[in-house]
Each structure stands twice: as structure tokens, then as C-alpha cells.
Image (cartoon, grey):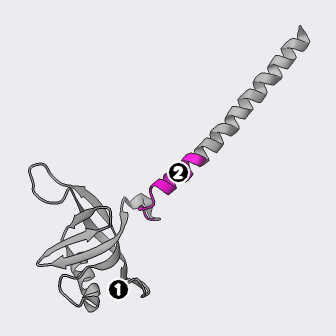
């Protein structure tokens, strides 16, 4: 009977320690999955800003960003005017879209308001990509 209890205690200890190792592995997998699923977030995770890349257009005091999956309205502020001055040399037509990387806050559209479902309030200009062959201009 003592031998049987001893074996039972060993099995329980091994089971508990195996579960602990499994939890550690699960946490690592969850962290890896979160990193992979949130590839649009920047390294500065604690500031709440999201990295957006896409084609930017500022025309007639209105701005949009086309990411290829979604088109966002862009809140016109000083950063947008600065971004517009950076992309102007690469435009051959006022309505040309230039590829950019920006960081900002995603703002949902208020009810009963016309416009894009989401807008971006830009807080940082990351890159301007004049064309696919050129190197990025880092600001």
C-alpha cells in the first residue's frame, strides 16, 4: 500500500510539473501569435499608435490613405500638411497618390455622420516611398 501511495504521489508531481511547463509554452505561443496578428502595430506599443502604410492623397483640404485593404479618411492637422510638403516633389499631378508610412490613432466614425467608417489622426510620419524602385525617405 505504501508503494502504491508513493507511485501515486510521483505521478501527481509529474503531472503538475508537466502542466506548469505546458502553461509556459502556451504563453509563449500566445505572445508569438499576438505579435504576428498585430503586425500593423509599431514597436512603441505603449503609446497606443498604430502603423499604417499605404497610398496617401491630400487634395482640396481633404486627405485619405488607401492601405490596399481599407480606405481611411485622415484628420487634417499640422502633420498632414508636413506630410503633404514631403510628398509634393514626387507628384506629377495634384491627385497622385504617394506611398507613405505613418503612425496614428484610429478613430471610428460617429453615428449619423457621413464619411469614411474610420479616420486616422496622424501623430508621426515614418516614411515616404516616392515609388517602388526608390529608397524610403525617413523623416
Locate residue 131 relative to residue 59 in the image: left or right: right
Residue topped by disc 1: 130
Q: Quadrant of residue 98?
A: bottom left
Mark 2: secondary structure? helix
Q: Secondary structure at mark 1?
A: loop
Judge whether residue 30 is colored magenta.
yes
| Residue on which disc 2 sits | 33
| Residue 22, x across and y down, in percent | 67, 38
Whole-percent x and y of residue 100? 34, 77
In-image side of 55 versus 47 (left or right): left
Q: Can you say whether 99 is above or below 3 in the image?
A: below
Q: For the image shown, how many numbered marks are present on the structure?
A: 2
Q: Position of residue 79 (x, y in %)?
A: 25, 76
Dot 1 crowding, Cα within 10 Å, few <14, some 14–19, many 20+: many
Q: Front-most of 100 and 4?
A: 100
Would residue 7 appear left or right of 130 to someone viewing this image?
A: right
Q: Residue, x 40% and y 83% (percent of image)?
A: 132
In the image, residue 3 lies in the stretch drawn in magenta: no
Quarter of the rendering occupied by the N terminus: top right
Q: Nearer the viewer, residue 137 or 16?
A: 137
* Residue 127 image offset from top left, x and y in percent: 38, 79
Instruction: Give the CA separation, mark 2 to mark 1.
Output: 33 Å
Q: Tell me which numbered mark, 2 or 1, is placed earlier along the sequence.
A: 2
Instruction: Specify the segment rendered in magenta.
Output: 29-42
Is the residue marked by circle 2 packed among few (<14), some (14-19), or many (20+) residues within 10 Å?
few
The residue depicted at 56 percent of the width and 53 percent of the height is: 32
Q: Nearer the viewer, residue 136 or 75?
A: 136
Amino acid at each position: 500500500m505504501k508503494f502504491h501511495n508513493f507511485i501515486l504521489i510521483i505521478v501527481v508531481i509529474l503531472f503538475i510539473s508537466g502542466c506548469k511547463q505546458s502553461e509556459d509554452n502556451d504563453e509563449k505561443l500566445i505572445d508569438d501569435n499576438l505579435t504576428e496578428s498585430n503586425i500593423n502595430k509599431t514597436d512603441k506599443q505603449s503609446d497606443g499608435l498604430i502603423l499604417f502604410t499605404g497610398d496617401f492623397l491630400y487634395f482640396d483640404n481633404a486627405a485619405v490613405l488607401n492601405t490596399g485593404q481599407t480606405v481611411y479618411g485622415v484628420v487634417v492637422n499640422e502633420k498632414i500638411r508636413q506630410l503633404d510638403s514631403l510628398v509634393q516633389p514626387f507628384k506629377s499631378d495634384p491627385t497622385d497618390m504617394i506611398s507613405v508610412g505613418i503612425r496614428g490613432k484610429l478613430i471610428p466614425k460617429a453615428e449619423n455622420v457621413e464619411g469614411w467608417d474610420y479616420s486616422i489622426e496622424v501623430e508621426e510620419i515614418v516614411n515616404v516611398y516616392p515609388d517602388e524602385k526608390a529608397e524610403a525617405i525617413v523623416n
